[in-house]
């Protein structure tokens, strides 16, 4: 109604507004012109009624009842033109309208009601046409995303951009699968997400500005889209979110393995955390907990399963078998396997037997798996450091011996842990570059394998036969490579200090490789 009063046609009538601001927020669906005392029965709600009041009841009690009937019918606003029948607004009308929260406007100058009607209807029709165009644009855009097979995170990102508000895709268990929210709002959005989401699904009053739409098709429901408060959209916020839900549902129908959400959502989260794409620990911790990983009071481990591919949705069931939860992402550098953040209750011992059970639950090919385990941690920062330790350890684990799953712990690799702790120290990086640059340049120029040969030699100090086997080279070719390495570096490879320096340089290179 507030927008209607801003029209020039209404300004010509010198309108006087009675009632509070809340009454003027009532939506106007149509305009009705009538002086009849029985007009209330002709209304459907949302109308603006124009009247001179010439046939209104004369008795105050009846006039009060008449205003009550208009309010009960859902009238948005009553506009009374003064001068034809009333010289001023009756006190009983003012009182009754105020009591019922009905917007009341008096026009002090005569205007053509047909002019007012035309202007308001034109505005309503223009808004409806704009809404139809906006809905069609939204439908076309999200249909195209579905047909192109766009991933869930991109669809959610498009929804957030369209609605200019945080959007969350959650599982049926109310874990955040994919979300798009400004980093500065992460703590506010994700803190106690599961609790707040369950309350919102059961009783929308506490989170009344949340918009929730199921993602479902063919009788199967996979999760929910949740849009947090934001500005109005011409197509309607609910209509936009529904189109996004349709696109996501079509993606699930075409996902044969059914792990696209876990693969895209949780891997995106792990990759972002490892890359430092978060503004503060509180917000990042809330985001991780919203994804289903308990942090408070839990023991946290970074774990890398390498050697064979691991399904993105296998880590959490494997962790649940131990009484915990897990989030899995890709190993940086494209190595087959998974980088996992593992949360376990304090009472659970993650010893080698438990680690082997975890590895076997991750993949049916556990006999070819190496499980690298970082140090236990109590916070997100510590957990990310533990995961980085596990990643570095998986790159420097050396050759496998026998059938797996093999368990390697950072506690047993103190040098690897030292490199992880100082991975960004420029002096350490400079050491690695100075020691290995001749070999790096040689391999790049000739497609050589000198770095791999050096790594095999350092992994088997004093046993050149085992080193040659690890390099998949004959002993004679292996010795030729060693001689070339020694010549290029200008060092004695039998010297223990040189071996230690080269080992450190290789660890630095592997830890910074992406």
Image: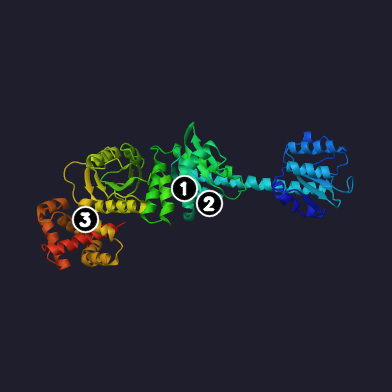
Q: CA distance from mark 3 to mark 2?
A: 47 Å
- Which of discs 3 and 2 lies nearer the camera? The answer is 3
Q: Which residue occupies 22% across, 59% down?
A: 506
Q: Which residue occupies 48% across, 55% down?
A: 184
Image location of residue 102, percent across then percent down:
74, 43
Residue 364 in the image: above or below residue 470: above
Q: CA distance from mark 3 to mark 1?
A: 37 Å
Q: Earlier in the sequence, mark 3 or mark 1?
A: 1
- Left or right: where 383 falls relative to 178: left
Image location of residue 361, percent across then percent down:
29, 37
Q: Earlier in the sequence, mark 1 or mark 2?
A: 2
- Left or right: where 194 falls relative to 339: right
- Which of discs 1 and 2 lies nearer the camera? The answer is 1
Q: Which mark is residue 452?
A: none
Q: Earlier in the sequence, mark 3 or mark 2?
A: 2
Q: Residues within 10 Å of mark 3 (few under 14, many from 20)?
A: few
Q: Is residue 36 visible?
A: no
Residue marked by disc 1: 190
Q: Which residue occupies 59% across, 50% down?
A: 231
Residue marked by disc 3: 414
Which quadrant is the C terminus positioned in?
A: bottom left
Q: Is residue 33 visible?
A: yes
Image location of residue 424, percent across then percent down:
31, 62
Residue marked by disc 2: 161
């Amino acid at each position: 109604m507030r927008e209607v009063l801003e029209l020039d046609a209404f300004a010509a009538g010198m309108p006087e507004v009675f009632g509070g601001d809340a009454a003027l927020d009532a939506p106007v669906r149509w305009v009705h012109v009538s002086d009849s005392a029985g007009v209330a029965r002709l209304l459907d709600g949302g109308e603006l009624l124009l009247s001179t009041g010439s046939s209104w009841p004369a008795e105050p009690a009846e006039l009060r009842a008449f205003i009550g009937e208009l309010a009960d019918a859902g009238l948005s606003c009553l506009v009374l033109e003064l001068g034809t029948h009333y010289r001023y607004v009756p006190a009983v009308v003012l009182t009754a309208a105020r009591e019922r929260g009905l917007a009341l406007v008096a026009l002090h100058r005569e205007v053509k009601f047909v002019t007012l009607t035309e202007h308001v209807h034109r505005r309503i029709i223009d808004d409806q046409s704009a809404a139809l165009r906006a809905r069609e644009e939204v439908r076309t855009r999200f249909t195209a995303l579905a047909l192109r097979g766009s991933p869930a995170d991109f669809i959610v990102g498009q929804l957030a951009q369209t609605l200019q508000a945080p959007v969350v895709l959650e599982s049926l268990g109310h874990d955040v699968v994919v979300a798009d929210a400004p980093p500065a709002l992460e703590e506010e959005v994700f803190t106690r997400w599961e609790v707040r989401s369950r309350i919102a699904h059961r009783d929308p009053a506490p989170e009344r500005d949340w918009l929730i739409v199921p993602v479902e098709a063919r009788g199967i429901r996979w999760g929910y889209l949740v849009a947090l408060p934001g500005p109005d959209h011409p197509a309607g916020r609910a209509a936009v979110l529904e189109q996004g839900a349709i696109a996501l549902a079509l993606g699930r129908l075409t996902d044969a393995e059914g792990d696209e959400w876990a693969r895209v959502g949780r891997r995106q989260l792990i990759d972002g955390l490892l890359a430092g794409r978060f503004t503060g620990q509180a917000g990042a911790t809330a985001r991780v907990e919203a994804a289903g990983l308990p942090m408070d009071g839990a023991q946290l481990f970074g774990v890398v399963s390498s050697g064979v591919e691991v399904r993105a949705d296998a880590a959490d069931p494997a962790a649940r078998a131990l009484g915990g939860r897990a989030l899995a992402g890709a190993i940086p550098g494209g190595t087959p396997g998974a980088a996992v953040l593992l949360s376990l209750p304090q009472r659970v011992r993650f010893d080698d037997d438990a680690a082997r059970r975890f590895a076997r639950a991750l993949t049916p090919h556990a006999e070819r798996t190496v499980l690298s385990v970082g140090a236990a941690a109590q916070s997100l920062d510590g957990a990310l450091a533990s995961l980085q330790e596990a990643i570095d350890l998986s790159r420097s684990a050396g050759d496998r011996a026998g059938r797996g799953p093999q368990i390697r712990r950072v506690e047993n690799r103190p040098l690897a842990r030292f490199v992880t702790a100082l991975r960004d120290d420029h002096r350490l990086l400079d050491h690695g570059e100075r020691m290995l640059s001749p070999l790096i340049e040689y391999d790049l120029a000739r497609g050589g394998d000198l770095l791999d040969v050096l790594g095999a030699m350092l992994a088997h100090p004093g046993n050149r036969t085992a080193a040659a086997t690890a390099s998949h080279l004959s002993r004679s070719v292996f010795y030729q490579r060693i001689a070339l390495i020694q010549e290029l570096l200008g060092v004695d490879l039998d010297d223990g200090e040189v071996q230690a320096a080269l080992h450190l340089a290789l660890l630095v290179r592997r830890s910074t490789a992406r």
